[in-house]
Image (cartoon, helix red, strand yellow):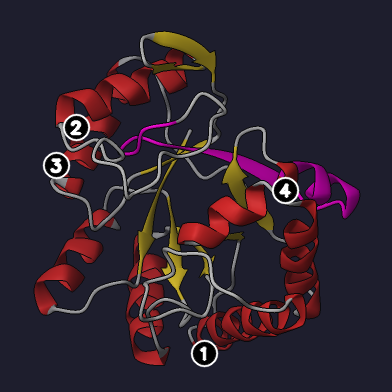
Amino acid sequence: MDLNADLGEFTTTGELDLELKLLEIVTSCNIACGGHIGDEASISKIIAAAKEQGVAMGPHPSYPDIEGFGRRSIDISKHDLRDSLSSQIKEFLDVAKSHDTSARHIKLHGQLYNDVSRSRELSEVFISAIKDNDLSLNVVGPFGSITEEVCSKYELPFISEAFVDRRYNENLSLVSRSKDHALINSIDKRLSQAKLIVLDQSILIDGKKFKMHAQTLCIHGDSPNALESAQLLKAALESEGVKFKYYG
């Protein structure tokens, strides 16, 4: 089982320190590369730290929407979206190259992650942006998504992901952040959800059990008690015999 975090989203020294501590726990990370936040300096800081910790890394592109932090759908043509994604990916690759390292995977951020997972057309745009950079990466996305089918078409490995700090709808889409119950802030409830996903390959939604297969778990670095949650989650699952390692 892999444990990942979305990083490179810090704006203060304290937030950077938290991200660096998370890198001591996770086995992979996704680094913001300018779409919703991030620049060459922030990418460089996290890449250097991830390399030092032996954590697999990859770009974390989004809609070009800094104002909305990539958490809303925007009116953008497929051509312009592809160009933006290609540019964000290239920004990451250029910085990684300067650190003598490379991307192992790619994961979309925010609303684009959700929109792409439900649209064959947007999935094609996403994969085209990857191919624009001559890459063959592990593509991280939600279990049962349309993106998985498109990845198979282009012979790209797809890695199914589940969130320990987000609630799901019955169609296995994420509950919108605009809803009061979208986030799981209780550490105990996060641990319970993680154990169900990993040990039972299922998830509880309104008291009903649904199949949920995941090769990687995500903990959001900007969620309350993220560091403690990651530490306890990893320890709890390791005590059940789960071994954490990168999926690639």
Q: Pointers 4 and 2 in contact (CB under 8 A)?
A: no
Report the residue at 21% width, 51% height from top: 223
Q: Which residue is mark 1?
A: 98
Q: Earlier in the sequence, mark 1 or mark 2?
A: 1
Q: Is residue 151 above or below residue 236?
A: below
Contact flag, marks 1 and 2 (Cβ < 8 Å) = no
Which of the two discs, 4 and 2, labels the residue nearer the N terminus?
A: 4
Whole-number angstrom distance, CA of label 4 to CA of label 2: 31 Å
Residue 195, horizontal then vertical, whole percent: 35, 19
Residue at disc 3, secondary structure: helix
* Residue type indicated by callout 1: Ser
Examine the structure image and report whether residue 151 is included in the region drawn in magenta.
yes
Check disc 4 and report its element: helix, strand or loop: helix
Residue with the mark numbered 4: 147
Observer-nearest of 156 and 222? 222
- Residue 80 lies left or right of residue 56; in this view the side is right
Q: Quadrant of residue 128?
A: bottom right
Viewer-nearest of discs 1 and 4: 4
